[in-house]
Image (tube, helix red, strand yellow):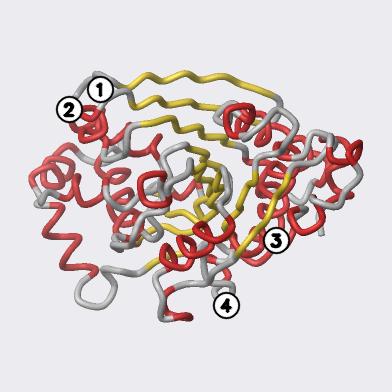
Amino acid sequence: MTLQKDLATLTDLAVEAKDMAVERTGGEISGVSVEEKQVENAEITRIEVLNQQAAQKIGKPQGSYITIESDSLRTTNRQVHEQLSGVVAEQMNSLINYSRLATSPTESPVILVIGLGNWNTTPDALGPRVVHHLLVTRHIYGSADPQAKQGLRSVCALAPGVLGLTGIETAEIIKGVVDRVKPDLIIAVDALAAQESNRLASTIQISNTGIYPGSGLGKKRIGITQQDMGVPVIAMGIPTVINSVHIVNDTMKQIQNNQDLPPQSRNVLQQTNQEELIQQVLQPFMGDLIVAPKGIDQLIRDTSRVVSGGINIALHPDIKTENVSMYLQ
């Protein structure tokens, strides 16, 4: 397998996988549509993978992928974070048809939010932290006043841990809960892996394709998808880690493209087998080195509130962007 193909498997972000496919083929990918727009404090990219041929070319399942990019996610500005929660909610709701989910016009669909990841490992704790901040209502929804229920939906949540903590595949735990609770929709939140360091803790991805936990780190896990769970799955995540291979590869590219470098040196670099060189540098101990940004504790605290706020606004009609902080646990 070539280095380019190896790198393509080490990212969870569809926007990066698409960019790598374009670079690899030298042109736009047939069957992939891209729509970009700018909103206050964020840039939104929507990628539609329209067929299986396109899915194979970019290495992502067929479906819709929404990427929200904002450097403000890395700040501690609560006012901006609330506004970004509103952006997250709007983009989430563009992928969810609530009327189709509900069994009757007067009843709320049951929505199960899954916080994937290991709460003992900070870069992997995004999912459990998001669940911690959610407004859950399923346990009181049946006895709530009919007028109050108009502004709420039936939401339950679970942070199932990881295989190393439980000895049980995460998807197996979720499937057991799904069979018992019978939700109409699953929202799965997980920490992701990126290819570019500038996307760490500054990018939110939302998709309707489900998720394979750990896939961005090259791990093989049972999927949390509509095919596996029997109900629609919305996947959400923020990249919190990057593989060392990407850092070395990006550094070599920048050196190679440095215009101040003498032409003779640039020619030597172009003729160098980069894949072999990277393997020599990183093996045998550093090939699987995973790097998280400085200040990851604060970043997880802040970004988890943004994602939780977005989910709360999206799922409960009475929660508005301007008062979302009141509902964060």
Would residue 84 be found to the left or right of residue 145 on screen? left
Residue at 20% across, 60% down: 278
Q: CA distance from mark 2 to mark 1?
A: 8 Å
Q: Earlier in the sequence, mark 3 or mark 2?
A: 2
Asked if disc 2 and disc 1 are in contact, CB closer than 8 Å, the reply is yes
Q: CA distance from mark 3 to mark 2?
A: 39 Å
What amino acid does circle 4 point to? Asn
Q: CA distance from mark 3 to mark 1?
A: 37 Å
Q: CA distance from mark 4 to mark 3?
A: 14 Å
Q: Earlier in the sequence, mark 3 or mark 1?
A: 1
Residue at 29% across, 60% down: 218
Which label lies toward us, 4 or 3? 4
Asked if disc 4 and disc 2 are in contact, CB closer than 8 Å, the reply is no
Local crowd at mark 1 within 10 Å, few (<14), some, or many (≥20)?
Answer: some
Residue 90 position within the rendered picture, expressed as x and y whole percent measured from the top left:
67, 29
Asked if disc 4 and disc 3 are in contact, CB closer than 8 Å, the reply is no
The quadrant in which the C terminus is found is bottom right
Query: Residue under circle 2?
Result: 25
What mark, if any, has residue 120 been given in the picture?
A: 4
Q: CA distance from mark 1 to mark 4?
A: 40 Å
What amino acid does circle 1 point to? Ile
Query: Residue under circle 1?
Result: 29
Local crowd at mark 2 within 10 Å, few (<14), some, or many (≥20)?
Answer: few
**Of helix, strand and loop, which one carries label 1?**
loop
- Image height check: is 74 above or below 40? below
Q: Nearer the viewer, residue 266 or 187?
A: 187
What mark, if any, has residue 301 been given in the picture?
A: 3
What amino acid does circle 2 point to? Thr
What amino acid does circle 3 point to? Arg
**Of helix, strand and loop, which one carries label 4?**
loop
Residue 17 position within the rendered picture, expressed as x and y whole percent measured from the top left:
32, 38
